[in-house]
Amino acid sequence: MDIQSRLTTLQPNQMSEDQQRVLAVIQKGPRGNLDGPFLAWIHSPALADHAQRLGAFCRYGTTLELRLTELAILTTAAWWRSQAEWQIHEPIARAAGVSDSVIEALRQQRTPAFTWADEQCVYKIGQSLYQSRRVDGVLYDQGVTLFGEPGMVELIGVYGYYSLVAMTLNTFEVRRDPTSPLPFDE
């Protein structure tokens, strides 16, 4: 896949020892590549190392169903209008069971009509965080009832981590395939 950004392209023979070490860890992990924010983060190997470990947990290690994690990621991508984040996670969300109608509503910046209470709660928590920077008591209690306290902590971690991802992708103009249409207008 042709990935581009506004950062200088790093070739393996130009990377520092730390960059090469982090690159090897990322490539041996579940991701297997420098897709998404890692193309930028590898410029700071210490950040890349910490961020990739947090990201691996947020994506693969939470107690939340993959469908809910991916819904939170798409909610974040839509909020930040993060092109690459959306392009990476939209097919994963679809495969995990997020409906086409929910995906399309998110892409169009509309409130989806949810079939499942857990999906609606995940979405409302994200919207609350992004719009008011808080989660009120009623919504918090609903989240704890549905996901437990550990699940709520992890959900907030997913939203925070993928906001960092979106900001990175947007700032450094990371593009996956320059011939593919972008999901959001710029």
Image (cartoon, rainbow, N blue to C red):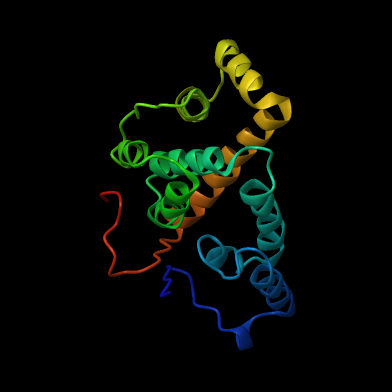
The image quadrant that residue 144 belongs to is: top right
User: Measuring 60% from the left and 41% from the top, which residue is drawn there?
Assistant: 158
x and y percentages locating residue 181 in the rendered image: 26, 60
For the point 47% across and 53% down, which residue is it?
A: 92
Residue 79 position within the rendered picture, expressed as x and y whole percent measured from the top left: 41, 38
Residue 141 horizontal/vertical position (percent)? 62, 14
In the figure, residue 91 lies in which quadrant?
A: bottom left
* Residue 42 placement, left or right of 127: right
Q: Residue furthest top?
A: 138
User: In the rendered image of this protein, does residue 141 appear above or below residue 104?
Assistant: above
Image location (x, y in percent) of residue 163:
53, 44
- In the picture, measured across the screen, residue 67 lies left or right of residue 114, that is right
Foreground residue, 42 or 33? 33
Image point 57% across, 70% down: which residue? 33
- In this rendering, the answer to whether 177 lies above or below 159 is below
Q: Quadrant of the N terminus?
A: bottom left
Q: Residue furthest bottom?
A: 13
